Image (cartoon, rainbow, N blue to C red):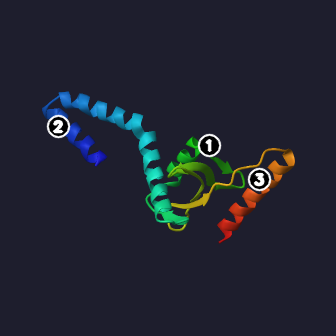
Amino acid sequence: MTAIICIALFLGGFFFPPLWLGLIGYIIYLWKTGKQRRSDIVQNHLEKMVESRKKKATVQNLYFEAAQAFAEDHGGHIFPEDQDTISCTVVIGGKPHTVSFMRERKTGGTYVQIAAYVPLDISSPENLRKSEEARLEELMKSLRQ
């Protein structure tokens, strides 16, 4: 749809020159709102998964790069040993969830996994280490399934 609008404004500009200003304005609009539009699309996919009680899904029309940018905007970090996996914490339906995005190499798209958020116990360094180990173990166990 975006391409059709740009082509129409471009061709129409030859017959009605003020449409060139419309084309420039539309391109600026697309550039300025790109981050919010991407965030809305990813958030919509996540909300649909939570509503349908799906914990895992491969989303064919979601590029990993878009999911990665979304996760980074929400405080996510790429796993150093696997550059194709990133996770973050997202509030969906008023509750925090841990969301992992993985590049799906064979079929394309992005593999998405949602789990209930497990908060860290940081009352002492020992509890922090145990909590972090428990979170990593739970994540690795769910990835193996």
Residue, disc 2: 12
Decide which of 69, 42 is in the foreground and name it. Answer: 42
Residue 42 image position (x, y, % from top left): 47, 51
Foreground mark, 1 or 3, reads: 3
Judged left or right of residue 79, residue 46 is left
**For mark 3, does the 10 Å Cα neighbourhood hold few (<14), some (14 to 19), or many (20 or more) residues?**
some
Separation of residues labelled 2 and 3 (CA atoms) = 59 Å
| 2 or 3: tag closer to the N-terminus | 2
In the image, is residue 51 above or below residue 126? below
Residue, disc 1: 75
For the residue marked with disc 1, what is the amino acid?
Gly
Give the residue displayed 33% in from the left and 35% down from the top: 27
Q: Residue furthest left?
A: 15
**Image quadrant in which the C terminus is located:** bottom right
The image's mark for residue 132 is 3
Label 2: element kind: helix
Q: Residue furthest right?
A: 126
In the image, is residue 85 above or below residue 3? below
Separation of residues labelled 1 and 2 (CA atoms) = 44 Å
Judged left or right of residue 99, residue 126 is right
In the image, is residue 18 above or below residue 124? above
Residue 136 image position (x, y, % from top left): 73, 58
For the residue marked with disc 3, what is the amino acid?
Glu
